[in-house]
Image (spheres, rainbow, N blue to C red):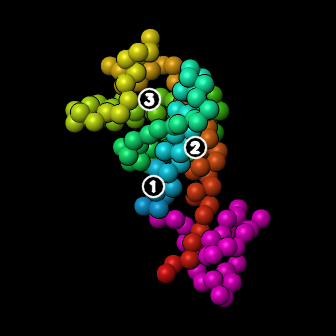
Amino acid sequence: MRHFHSGTVVGDESPAEPDNLGPLHPLSALFRLYVYALHGCLCEVAFTAVYDWCSTRDQRLPGHSSIWALPMYGSAIFCMEALSARLLAQSRSLPVRLAVYTLFIYMWEFSWGVGLSLMGACPWDYSGHRYNLRGLVTLDYAPAWAVAGLIAEQHVIKNTLRIRLKNG
């Protein structure tokens, strides 16, 4: 199935190029980083809104994030492109892939947390969670990170790599 709209094509196969559309090209790395950054921030705002609602019942659902989340999520999902491709090429089972994605996300979050903490800019603190490491990661979020990895693999990365744009 193909959809043509404003020079954008989404489909499983490379479509015939209509004369008026010109050649179509995959998104550049920079555009993919942008898509992944926005996706990550949106997910974080939605997650924090629901998570906070569970304790406050605030119907306004005021989710929150930090500008630091843009490069953090963008680069994480960008790196997951290669990780996902490799795991799928090796026919790894879903539980193995989810475990790898979860460990990768923990490693990524911890690394960013250390770097941001050194600058006095880390926007999160999990010290109040029972199972945390230096307040930078918590085991409480393992199920959420596994789901995030699955969504990234099955929807975000897969569909972002299918987008085709006209140059110029």
The tag earlier along the polypeptide, 1 or 2, is 1
Q: Are marks 1 and 3 in contact (CB under 8 Å)?
A: no
Was residue 5 drawn as part of the magenta stretch in this picture?
A: yes
User: At which x and y percent is residue 100?
Assistant: 52, 31
> Mark number for residue 66?
none
SS state under label 1: helix
Residue type indicated by callout 2: Ala
The answer to which of 163 and 51 lies nearer the viewer is 51
Q: Is residue 7 above or below residue 149?
A: below
From the image, tell me which residue sits under label 1: 33
Identified by mark 3, the residue type is Tyr
Quarter of the image for residue 65 reads top left
The region drawn magenta spans 1-29
Q: In this view, does 99 lie to the left or right of 116?
A: right
Give the residue at x 69% y 84%: 18
For label 2, the crowd category at 10 Å Cα-Cα, with few meaning under 14, some 14 to 19 and many 20 or more, is many
Residue annotated with mark 2: 152
